[in-house]
Amino acid sequence: MGLRRWGPLAVWAGAFGVGVLLMPIADALPFLTRANLVVFALHGIAAMGLTLVMGFAGQVSLGHAAFYGVGAYTTALLTAKVDWHPLLAMAAGAVIAAVLAALLGRIVFRLRGHFLAMATLAFGLVFYVVMRSWDSLTGGNQGTGGIPDFTLGPLRFDSDTSMYLLAWAVLLLGLIAARNLLSSRPGRALVAMGSSEVAAASVGIDVARTKMAVFALGAVYASVAGSLYAHYVTYVSPESFGLLPSLRFLVISTVGGIDSVWGAPLGSAVVVLLTEGTRELVPRFVSGATGSYEIVAYGLALVLVLLFLPRGLAGGAALLVRRAAEWAGTRRQPAPTAALEEVELR
Amino acid sequence: MSLLQVEDVTVEFGGLRALDGVSMGVDAGRVTALIGPNGAGKTTLLNVVSGVLRPGRGRVRFRGRDVTGWPQHRVAGLGVARTFQNLQLFGQMTVREHLLVGRYRLTRTSFLEAVLRLPRHFREEKEGREASDALLSRLGLADVADWPASALPYGRQRLVEVGRALASEPSLLLLDEPTAGLSGAEAEEVGRLLRRLAAGGLAVLLVEHHMDLVMSYSDWVVVLDHGVVIAQGPPEQVQSDPQVIEAYLGEEAA
């Protein structure tokens, strides 16, 4: 119980420490830049929202980047054009994302499986097209810039290092919030619903409403990450919120594992390394190669994980820990999970 | 008036009439058994009562209130709990967590209260834990409270489902073949549990194939055949009803 409760946070703290040590030398390392350490956290936060939606509401979303975009654009417009405080703009983005998600959920959760996936895909594309076409508001294809630094009282987050600290702090808050949620009444309702909707409804859980709520929560995670992203790059354009970014979040969540809040950060680390790796390696072997080869790497990673670790890296890690605990404890007492194998074999 | 009243309920699937003008009642403090050959419509009736299915015709009243066509979660919110013929446990959850989920209708902690760990969360968790542990002891599941339910042998998994239903402190409990796959001794155990629950004032509606169990532990038996109630009454009376005997023998001959 103790390990389950605090283990992930200890791992986070360890990874954070490694990040701090890497910060000064990151740019000199292969496959890594300081920016990667920031992007890792931003993608991790957004994907954690998707993990909640997929893992617990059992709903695939192919439009998650749109909510990332809602946060980014709301922040861009409210801080660059009308000079709102970054925190207020971030909150506004989160509210807009939540309302949009709830409305979308009301409509699309009547659909199932492929149809639902298509509907979220369509939503993502609509968002992309609107951002690209609404020139007067969003700057169209050119995007919109001049986004000020994120500030918090006297603190100004204007460098890779300070953004690193901020993004990782928010990632930690996201982890704690998700963990708190899952070990409580509404969180258990989510897990129950993801496992059997008819049984969840039989104890009084309003499945439709709960799905909407988790969809909205997932959108809030994405939106907050998007707001931070806007401050970090000081400029947003539609390309960052289209289909490929949505697929990237899907890959992060799936590779990391969708039944653990810990999956998103793990998956995000893998995707950052894959992206940088292909970007550096492919041109070395294929002369004149340009373009987004990372999508090939995403695809490969996805196939490999689904084949060998269907519950993702987090699921695989949990299995390892349990096996190790069983191995260490076999002499003293039979572990509860020992019976699991027997039942499954039957 | 009965706690649960089913009036003239008819359900059709395509052209097939699964239930045809079924009327019956379930009283508090009694075990009412619903029996009949395979395909008689027993599970369909449970699905109508619990809100999974909307009947084409007829009414369902609970405590006199018309709940026909209400969604499942609202019916459950009134205190109607059920188990499933094919187990519907929650994947990775422990036995205790199943019972905590069962308490959903009795608790109020919201998303925000849970994330921010506001006082209501701690109060309800504490109450939930105490109530669940007491129920686990009553069901003989205390020793496996922290096991994943999926790791238990089949018979005890069935008991976890009953526990999840009881955790919601229902006034009507619907059980869909709770002894399927259990040994004779385990089934007897379930029977004794049902008697204790009924003695405590609970209304139990039991769908069951296990005839010995029905005859020894129920107060009232309703027999369905091809969607029609062909007999009802106390067990000994139903047992000797020629129509009932024919329905069962007819099935065996087929």
Image (cartoon, coloured by chain):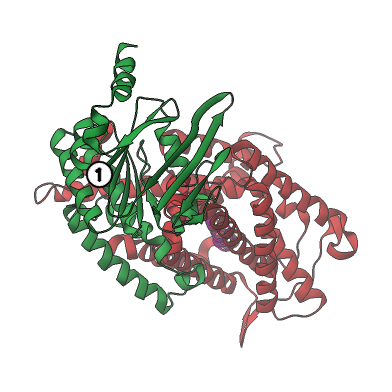
Q: Position of residue B235 (x, y in %)?
A: 24, 36
Whether the magenta-drawn stretch holds residue A154 is answered as no
Hue used for the chain lettered B = green
At 68% from the left and 63% from the top, the residue drawn is A99
Nearer to the camera, B162 or A180: B162
At 49% from the left and 45% from the top, the residue drawn is A255
Nearer to the camera, B41 or A101: B41
- Residue B181 can be seen, yes or no: no
Chain to which the residue tagged by mark 1 belongs: B
Q: Position of residue B227 (x, y in %)?
A: 45, 29
Instruction: Write down which chain is painted red.
Output: A
At 28% from the left and 66% from the top, the residue drawn is B129
Q: Position of residue A86 (x, y in %)?
A: 68, 77
Nearer to the camera, A183 or A244: A183
- Horizontal relation, residue B152 to residue A271: left or right: left
Instruction: Name the dominant secondary structure of the magenta segment.
Output: helix
- Residue A159 can be seen, yes or no: yes
Residue picked out by circle 1: B219
Nearer to the camera, A139 or B177: B177
- Horizontal relation, residue A59 to residue A88: left or right: left
- Horizontal relation, residue B194 to residue A175: left or right: left
Instruction: Please determine whether, in this image, residue B189 is positioned above or below residue A3.
Output: above
- Horizontal relation, residue B205 to residue A113: left or right: left
**Residue A36 in which image quadrant:** bottom right
Bounds of the magenta segment: A37-48
Q: Position of residue B79 (x, y in %)?
A: 40, 58
Secondary structure state at the residue bearing disc 1: loop
